[in-house]
Structures are given as structure tokens and as C-alpha cells.
Amino acid sequence: CSPPSTSIIRSSTKQDIHIDSSIWQQAEPTPFKVNLLTLPLPELETLVKSWGFKAFNARQIHNRIFSQGVTDIDQMSELPKQLRAVLHERATIGSLHLEIEQISQDGTKKRAYKLHDGQMIESVLMPYEDGRRTACISSQAGCAMGCVFCATGQMGFARQLTSEEIYEQVARFAAELKGEGERLSNIVMMGMGEPLANYRNVIAAIRRMNTELGIGARKITVSTVGIVPNIRKLMNEDLQVRLALSLHCATDEERTALLPANRRYGGLDELMSTIREYIRVKKSRVTFEWALIEGENDSKEVARTLGRLLQRHDIRPDMAHVNLIPLNPTGGFGGGPSGRANVHKFVEVLEKEFGVSATPRMRRGIDIDAGCGQLKASVKKKEDATKVILAQPDGNGLPMVGVYEDEEGGEDEMGGDDMEVQDLSHGSVVDFAINDDFIDLDDDDIAEDFIDPTFDDEFEFEEAERLIALVKGSTLQQTSQSPPRAAVSENETSPPKLPSKQKSTTITDDDALRKAKRRRKKLLKNLKAIQKLKDTEQAGKVLNEEQMEKVGKEKEWTIELESVEHNLM
């Protein structure tokens, strides 16, 4: 074996740097594969000709995929054998990996796709008795809008989807339906994410749906929480897509509590004025989405408030339609769907008193987590539940250490009963590796990442109730378990003004309130993890130095928790 060759590079400091050229002699990278589901026909023709085949072979491939729903290259038997071999090597039919598919009793199909970087998105296909086939498509991995009743909003934002990733969701459904003798008729951009926050990629994908898949622009609906600048941009596009506004509340106070983006984009007056202008320019009716939450926004008086909001902004009744959606329950929000009687009364008020059409939308796929973000949350929860807290990594034989979040009643931080630590006593020195998934209990920036969408305890349930109470403009009373606070009865006179060095501990700023709630959530999780570490130690297992340091912070975090809870009163 000959010694590796070297290259000499003269650096800016005039010193010779010797580089071992063998570092470049690594395995060839995985070849890039062309996605036949997202490649336009003219580009496919050019590509196939560059491989030495005929343009009509490209049309054969395109026809088999989009007219016959073929998803296997080997089924394209009319293609030359050599071309099929090239396709196997250099092409793929779709880049989205189907992680799970669920089919509802009503025929609704819900899919969770895993992307190339491990992110997960959802797509839904909804069949209707009148022959329509509607696809609900995601535009982002996660969502940054923070709507408190939405499963996607509860999981936070990961990244924008590319226009190809958006388009492929539609192309897959369209190709499969063609293979079954049916066609995809409607698209609603109401899946994971805020479409108008990914404006450029969403518009590019919509244009391809229109021109390449033959889906009319008026059969495509773009939903938004109300990103005013991009509604204005959409107003000037040469696309006659339909617009749906996620409204849900008719006053700024209530809407900001449920949809924090309301305040960010100027509130209801700015939003509704923009909608009025959109209707005038596009001459198109706008749909107002309204998630009906029992006892919160489903009363006759709330319906009148909505009707007056439309009137105040001169939105013509014939250019507005209210789509009433019974709430899809999620683990992170305590509200429930409205009953039929309240839905009927809500519709009656809008139609008879204000002349605004309203339609209760049937909840589809309720038995398969078909609501936005619900299937991903379900899959992620199962993945998290299977994490091994202390595991033997491949290759180095070193145990993984760290404190991890787990399910109630799951394995403890030391890896469960079947993990053995032999011949160790207090103070023993061992080699170890840090697992990439460990939780840094001191990192404030990741506090939000560990908000569990299910209720682990009474505290979490109370937090959900608190959010509902914000819609009413009131605050729930603290439970008897909360730290006591000084109170003044109605019959007592107000106490004298506090000295200047004392400050009120009541939080009134919304941002500070959210931060305090997140901090309390994190402190409770930290103390719970510490208790498990202490239980582990009492069981005779040895904690490492880092874990012992965390246990030593118990008193400090307990005092901080008491302070935070007092401030939230």
C-alpha cells in the first residue's frame, strides 16, 4: 500500500500547510435522483433526450404517472429496458416518505409524510357523495402563528416547505385518483402551516396545480390567519383562487387570546378593511372560518357580534360566507365542539338577522386524527415514548447519560429496570457519552420544546381552562393548591399605597404572562425529573456528576417556582 500523497498550500502567514489528499478519497456521495412527480413535462423531455432516448419516452413516463397512477417504474413495461434501468438509478416517483396512513369510516384518508430532513407533514384526501375529491395540503412543517386550539400551532414552527414539497402532496393524490378512474377536483391550503407566511412557494405550487394538473384556480382555496401584507399581495396576483380567513372571534380581545397573530398584524379593523378591499378588487366572495367552541364563541349574541363586525366594515352579505367548523379536540386545549342546537341557532342569527350565508361543516375523519397537526402529534408522541433513556451506542460501548423527558409511568432516566450498572459505588469514575437528545435543564431557549400536548397533571388542565377564560375576558380563580395571596374583601377599605421599593407581583403584560407560564411549566418538569433522579439514586444506582449537580438545584428551583406561581395570581 503506497503512502498517501500530500499537497502543499502557502497560507497567508507564509507557512506551508500540508494537506493529506487521502481525506478526499471517501465513498462517493449518494447520487441525486430526479423526482418524476414534480418534474414538468418539458424538463422531463429534455432530461430523457440527454440520456439518449426519445422525447416520446418522456411523454410515456408522464402519462403513466399522471393518467394511470403508476408508482412503480417496473410497471412501465412499454419503456425500453435500458431506460427503465436508468430511471431506477437516477429517478424516483416522489420524495415524500409515507410514514403512516389512516382511513376513516367516512372514506377520508389522512397521511403523515416524513421529509428528507426528518420533519413531518400531513395531507388529507376527503371524498364527498357528490363526487368531489378534495385534498387538504400543508404549506409548512409546523406553524409559528400559535393558535391555541390548533394541534399544529401547539407544536411550533420547524421550516418552510419548498414549492416542490407542496406540489407533490397534490400530485400524489391526483395520480392515485387517476389510476382509480377518478380525478382530484378541489384543493384547500388548510393543512399544517400558514400558507401566506410561505407566500412565494405556495403561489409557485398553486400555479403548477393549475397549469400541470388542470385544477381550476377557483377550485383552490388559500386559508390564512390574517397576514395583512400578503393578503394585499394576493389581491394583485393574476390568480382567481378563493380566500378563506380563519376568524373565529369577532372582538380584538377574544381573537388575540386565541390567535396571537391578530395583534401582530394590526387587529380586526386593519384585517377587515383589507378583506373589504380584497373583495372589491377580486370580485370574489370570501369565506370566514369559525371554529365553534362550546360555551365560548357559539352563542346567539356572539353570532350577532360577528354580523355587526361585517356590517361595520361594509362587507356585503352576498360576498361573505361563514364556514362553521365544530372544534376538533386536541390534547393541548380544553375546549370542546359545540352541540347541534347551538350550531343551528348560530346559523339562524346570521342568515335571518344579517343575510349572511352560513354552513356547518361536517367534521370529517374525526376517528383518525384528521384535524390539522393531530396525526403528526400522535406519531411524534409514540416516537418519544419509545426513546431509550440510557442506551449502548454502536461502536464505542459507552453508556448514554442525561436527563430526558418521557411519558408518565415510563422508564426512568437511568434506562429502566433491565439496565444494569455493575461494580460501581458512589464516586466511581466511568467513561460515558452524551446522548444528542438529552435535555439541558438550564436552557431557557428550549423551554417551549417540551410543552406536552396532553394533560400530564391538574396544572396542565388548569392552564387550558385559563386560555378559554381569556376568550371571556376573565381570569379563572386559582385553586386552593396555589400559594395564598393577600386579598381585600369588598367590605374592607383599600390598604395604603405600598412603599416604592415594593412592586406589584401581578403580571398584566401578555408577553410576560406567556413567558411566566412557560417558565412555570419548565420548572415543574425539572422538579419532576429531579425527583426521578433521586428515586434512581435511592434504588442503588449511581448518579454522575452532572446529574448530582441538577439534583442540587432542587431547592433553588422550588423557590423560583413559588415566586412564579405567586406572580401569576
Image (cartoon, rainbow, N blue to C red):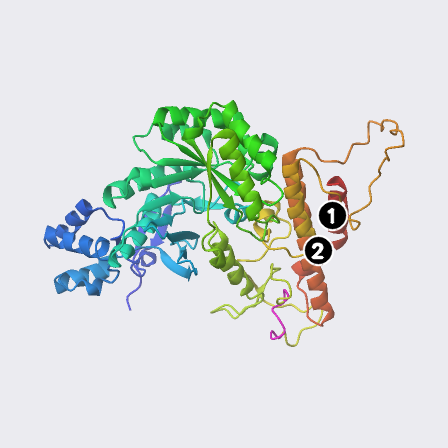
Q: Residue at x 72, y 42 (%)?
A: 476
Of the 4 image quadrants, the one containing the N terminus is bottom left
* For marks 1 and 2 on the same chain, the one whose residue lies earlier in the sequence: 2
Q: Residue furthest front?
A: 352
Q: Position of residue 546 (x, y in %)?
A: 66, 58
In this rendered view, identify the residue nearer to me: 221 or 157.
Answer: 221
Reply yes or no: does residue 419 show up in magenta.
yes
Residue 147 visible in the snapshot: no
Q: Position of residue 84 (x, y in %)?
A: 17, 62
Identify the element where label 1 is drawn: helix
Q: Which residues are magenta?
A: 412-420
- The residue under label 2 is 527
Residue 467 visible in the snapshot: yes
Of the 4 image quadrants, the one containing the C terminus is top right
- The residue under label 1 is 561
Q: Amino acid at mark 2?
A: Leu
Q: Is residue 425 above or below residue 67?
A: below
Q: Main secondary structure of the magenta part?
A: loop
Q: From mark 1 to mark 2, how far is it between C-alphas? A: 10 Å
